[in-house]
Amino acid sequence: MNSKCKTIAVVNQKGGVGKTTTTYNLGWELGRIGKNVLLVDFDSQGNLTMQAGQFNPDRLDKTIANVMAEFIDNYEIKSNTEDLIIHKEYVDVLPANVELAGLELSLNQVTSRETVLADVLEKFKNDYDYILIDCSPSLGLLPVNALAAADTVIIPVAAQFWAVKGMETLLKSISMIKRRINRNLRIEGILLTMYNPTYKITRDMQEAVELHFGEAVNVFDVKIPESIKMRESGPLALSARELQEIRKDSKPLFGIMTAYENLAKEIAGKECE
């Protein structure tokens, strides 16, 4: 086991807050500063897998679901996992597809069902400095497995109306998992996404997050700017940095790229303190 490998779950039970975008771009920027990074798609929709360029994830023969199923059956992984990893320039991606939804249902019948992912990821830790888990938008057994496997949690929150609704439930769930399953789990921070300070609603949401949660939970100084152009990154399977290199005149893209770069440096810097 590589004690130097840090596992981060990117989680929020609300969809559309930038979990996949954050997982991919934070991983990319950590890779750029010399870290070995594995991204784990832990959502049966396969959005992170598609972001990595596999646009038909349901056609994949082998995914994270197959590896977990093998562990459930044998309590070990003997098969070659290298052939299922998607290799990008700065990150590796462990893909997912709809089979993960079926596996989540079968987990209910498994002993120690909350820690299957943690056991599986032990196989990969020697090869990576960081493992980032892109969680599904729920508080079901898959996110519970991610939190049981994680050292820390990043909570992306869109700076929009009702964005903080449900945050207390999420924080209670994290606290429960820390008490019962993963005593070392801690919250890395709340990350404000889709941020546009020219909107009053954005400023109000920032104030609400900082007022209600800021004393107990770190709120990152880094904010991820809003950008319509960023929507191109998924269909093109590009990071914000790669897209910025194509759209050189885009200030919003430059802002997003820089924000994730600063977030990566902040997280990596904590490990050096």
Image: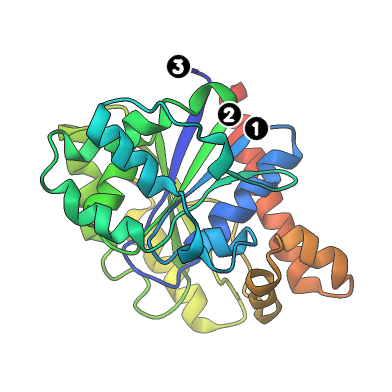
Q: Quadrant of residue 175?
A: top left
Q: From mark 3 to mark 1, how far is it between C-alphas?
A: 15 Å
Mark positioned earlier in the residue sequence (3 or 1): 3
Q: Is residue 40 visible?
A: yes
Q: Are marks 3 and 2 in contact (CB under 8 Å)?
A: no
Q: Residue 35, image x and y in percent?
A: 67, 32
Q: Are marks 2 and 1 in contact (CB under 8 Å)?
A: yes
Which residue shows up at 62% across the image and 39% down it?
Answer: 266
Q: Would you name the residue on which mark 3 appears?
A: 1
Q: From mark 3 to mark 2, how far is it between C-alphas?
A: 11 Å
Q: Is residue 218 visible?
A: no
Mark 1, secondary structure of its residue: loop
Q: Quadrant of residue 69?
A: top left
Q: Would you name the residue on which mark 1 appears?
A: 36
Image quarter (top left, top right, bottom left or bottom right) of the C terminus: top right
Give residue 128's mark: 2
- In the rendered image of this protein, does residue 128 appear above or below residue 223? above
Which residue shows up at 88% across the image and 75% down it?
Answer: 249
